[in-house]
Image (cartoon, helix red, strand yellow):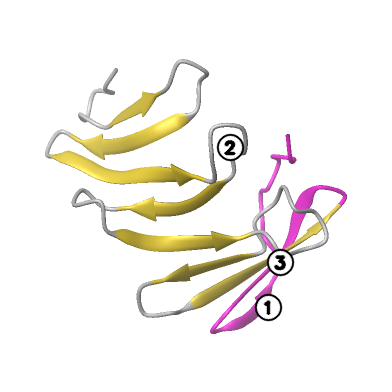
Amino acid sequence: MADKFGNWKDYDKLGFLLSYGTRNGIVGKLVYAGLTDRRVVAIADRNDRQVVWFDYGGADPSLPSVARDLANRRVEYAYTGGRLSQVRDVLGPRRPTNTTATAA
């Protein structure tokens, strides 16, 4: 179902996000680790070219610890008590603001 601006999201039968886009077409597709391992390991563009990768090598293997893009730029994530507590990118470490979501 699309919103009033034509943005939409497509989910599988279990409620996992498969793709999202605009009225002009697909913007991104989520690539999962597997049918039983529903961690998002990559995001692909409309041409199925992977453009973002996620690594899960941190203290909690259910949470992404690093995101990389095609230019190999990295963003590192740190968590405290299952909540995002720090983000480090090329500008250095920063504490996230307004984060209310916890790991499932």
Pointers 3 and 1 in contact (CB under 8 A)? yes
Residue 3, quarter of the rendered image: top left
Residue 54 vertical position relative to residue 2 in the rendered view, above or below = below
- Label 3, residues with CA under 10 Å away: few <14, some 14-19, many ≥20: few
- Callout 2: SS: loop
Pointers 1 and 2 in contact (CB under 8 A)? no
Q: Amino acid at mark 1?
A: Pro
Q: Residue at x 21, y 37 (%)?
A: 22
Residue 88 vertical position relative to residue 30 in the rendered view, above or below = below
- Label 2, residues with CA under 10 Å away: few <14, some 14-19, many ≥20: few
Which residue position holds label 1? 93
How far, Cα to Cα, is label 1 from label 2?
A: 28 Å
- Callout 3: SS: loop
Residue 102, quarter of the rendered image: top right
The reply, left or right, for residue 22 in relation to residue 97 is left
Q: Return the mark for residue 95.
A: 3
The reply, left or right, for residue 47 in relation to residue 101 is left
- Callout 1: SS: strand
Residue 61, given in percent of the width and then of the height, sits at: 75, 53
**The N terminus appears in which quarter of the rendering?**
top left
How far, Cα to Cα, is label 3 from label 1?
A: 7 Å
Residue 16 vertical position relative to residue 54 in the rendered view, above or below = above
- Residue placed most toward the observer, 104 or 47: 47
| Residue lying at the far front of the rendered structure | 35
How far, Cα to Cα, is label 2 from label 3?
A: 27 Å
- Of label 1 and label 2, which has the lower sequence position? 2
**The C terminus appears in which quarter of the rendering?**
top right
Residue 42, quarter of the rendered image: bottom left
* Residue 99 is one of the magenta-drawn residues: yes
Q: Residue at x 25, y 51 (%)?
A: 48
Q: Return the mark for residue 38.
A: 2
Q: What's the magenta region?
A: 81-104
